[in-house]
Image (cartoon, helix red, strand yellow):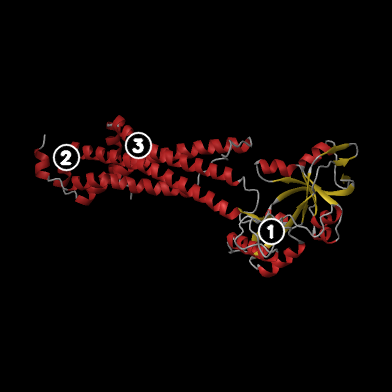
């Protein structure tokens, strides 16, 4: 049941000291406002940086380099060539691998020709599994399939830069033939790379053909330049990275201590490092904001002490007329909660409103400021902030309320 008299009394008290109440509540307002703003900005930074990961978050890449240690009569400085047999060996002896995508690249300087137009592009030999490691938007037609790989078909999937330089505006490239080093490939699909970093610029001017076709047509028989892999669910990428490199070292007679013979990249580790960074940023945001809120709570507590002092005689009269200590305590705490709750709620609205405005502008205009993506307010933050406000208000009024409850009616009535 709502006590109208109590709420009226709280309203009159706040109204009587508007400036004092506003200045006191500002600390709570600013703490909540900064909490929402900092967490929203941190989320925007997280979205901006994670969008740069245009590969599977648990991807592992392994490639060969030159040996640095002599081993089994073989000199240091030897270049290692991985082969198709390594694919089956990895599948057999490293069961933790879920997806494996071997890849090659056409070497040398050359131009890709279509009709009277020509330009230089990167030509990669891929398998269908690469889409599970490095997702790509297929815009029209299709991507390379297993039949293309098995039958060594001369088909190609081209990116936006190829369309721009070789095909006219509005021209459908599907079914057309392009010449790569004098060998004709039929275009069966177009793609648009995902992501926003320099890798996307490179991918945009890449042409994909079946890896087996590349090996046969461009004199790379039984050769693999690098492997892209993902582990099975629940398996850390580091396990796959370690076991695959150990297996390849054994198969290609590389010293177990030779750390330079094989290069690798563990995207999962990089992603976890980034996530740890953002957890630290969020923790720092909470620390700064909670510190500001505590300062505001102390201010509210001091004001409530003054209120109790000013209303000592009134409280004494209440107790003389039969008011219980609990009713006195609840009145003071309720007034404290109203001040902190209202100030915090305004701060919450201001913060979320600002974040929503910035997010809407960036999304509508497809804007990304460097590594910053559209900011975002987590609903959990709003709920947590509300709980913090209620608890903070209760704590701010607890000491003044306790002091008010201990007022001696006789002494209070004697005060001037």
Mark 3 or 2: in front is 3
Q: Is residue 231 in view from this perspective?
A: no
Q: Residue at left 21%, top 48%?
A: 402
Query: In the rendered view, would you say 138 is above or below 375?
Result: below
Residue 285 placement (x, y as % from top left): 43, 43
Residue 35 placement (x, y as % from top left): 43, 42
Q: Bin the neighbour count of mark 1 within 10 Å (Cα to Cα): few under 14, some 14-19, many 20 and up.
A: few
Residue position marked by numbered label 3 in the rendering: 27
Please identify the quarter of the rendering in which residue 66 is found: bottom right
Residue position marked by numbered label 2 in the rendering: 312
Q: Is residue 343 left or right of residue 133?
A: left
Give the CA distance from mark 1 to mark 3. Answer: 71 Å
Could you tell which of marks 1 and 3 lies nearer the N-terminus?
A: 3
**Contact check, label 2 and label 1, Cβ < 8 Å:** no
Give the CA distance from mark 2 to mark 1. Answer: 94 Å
In the image as oriented, which residue stretches furthest toward the bottom?
A: 92
Query: In the rendered view, would you say 205 is above or below 146?
Result: above
User: Count the marks: how many?
Assistant: 3
Q: Bin the neighbour count of mark 3 within 10 Å (Cα to Cα): few under 14, some 14-19, many 20 and up.
A: many
Give the CA distance from mark 3 to mark 2. Answer: 27 Å
Q: Is residue 70 left or right of residue 409?
A: right
**Label 1: which secondary element:** loop
**Label 3: which secondary element:** helix
Closer to us: 4 or 59: 59
**Contact check, label 1 and label 3, Cβ < 8 Å:** no
Residue position marked by numbered label 1 in the rendering: 75
Query: In the rendered view, would you say 260 is above or below 181?
Result: below
Q: Quarter holding the C terminus?
A: top left
Could you tell which of marks 3 and 2 lies nearer the N-terminus?
A: 3
């Amino acid at each position: 049941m709502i006590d109208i008299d109590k709420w009226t009394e709280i309203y009159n008290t706040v109204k009587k000291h508007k400036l004092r109440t506003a200045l006191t509540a500002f600390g709570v307002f600013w703490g909540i406002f900064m909490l929402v703003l900092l967490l929203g900005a941190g989320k925007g930074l997280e979205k901006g940086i994670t969008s740069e990961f245009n590969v599977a978050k648990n991807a592992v890449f392994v490639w060969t380099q030159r040996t640095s240690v002599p081993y089994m009569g073989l000199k240091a400085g030897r270049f290692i060539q991985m082969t198709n047999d390594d694919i089956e060996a990895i599948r057999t002896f490293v069961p933790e691998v879920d997806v494996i995508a071997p890849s090659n690249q056409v070497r040398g300087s050359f131009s890709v020709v279509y009709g009277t137009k020509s330009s230089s592009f990167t030509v990669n030999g891929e398998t269908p599994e690469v889409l599970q490691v490095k997702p790509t938007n297929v815009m029209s037609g299709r991507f390379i399939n297993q039949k293309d790989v098995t039958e060594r078909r001369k088909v190609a999937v081209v990116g936006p830069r190829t369309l721009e330089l070789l095909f006219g505006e509005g021209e459908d490239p599907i079914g057309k033939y392009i010449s790569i080093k004098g060998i004709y490939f039929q275009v069966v699909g177009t793609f648009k790379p995902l992501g926003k970093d320099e890798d996307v610029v490179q991918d945009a001017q890449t042409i994909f053909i079946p890896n087996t076709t590349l090996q046969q047509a461009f004199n790379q028989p039984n050769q693999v330049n690098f492997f892209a892999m993902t582990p099975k669910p629940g398996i850390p990428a580091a396990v796959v990275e370690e076991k695959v490199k150990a297996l390849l070292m054994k198969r290609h007679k590389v010293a177990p201590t030779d750390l330079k013979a094989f290069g690798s990249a563990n995207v999962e580790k990089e992603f976890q490092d980034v996530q740890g960074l953002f957890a630290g940023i969020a923790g720092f945001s909470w620390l700064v904001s909670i510190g500001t809120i505590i300062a505001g709570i102390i201010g509210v507590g001091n004001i409530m002490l003054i209120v109790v002092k000013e209303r000592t005689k009134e409280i004494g009269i209440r107790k003389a007329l039969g008011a219980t200590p609990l009713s006195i305590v609840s009145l003071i705490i309720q007034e404290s909660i109203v001040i902190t709750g209202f100030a915090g709620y305004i701060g919450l609205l201001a913060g979320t409103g600002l974040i929503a405005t910035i997010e809407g502008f960036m999304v509508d205009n497809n804007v990304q400021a460097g590594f910053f993506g559209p900011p975002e307010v987590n609903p959990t933050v709003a709920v947590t902030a509300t709980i913090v406000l209620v608890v903070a208000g209760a704590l701010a009024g607890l000491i003044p309320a306790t002091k008010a409850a201990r007022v001696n009616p006789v002494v209070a009535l004697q005060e001037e």
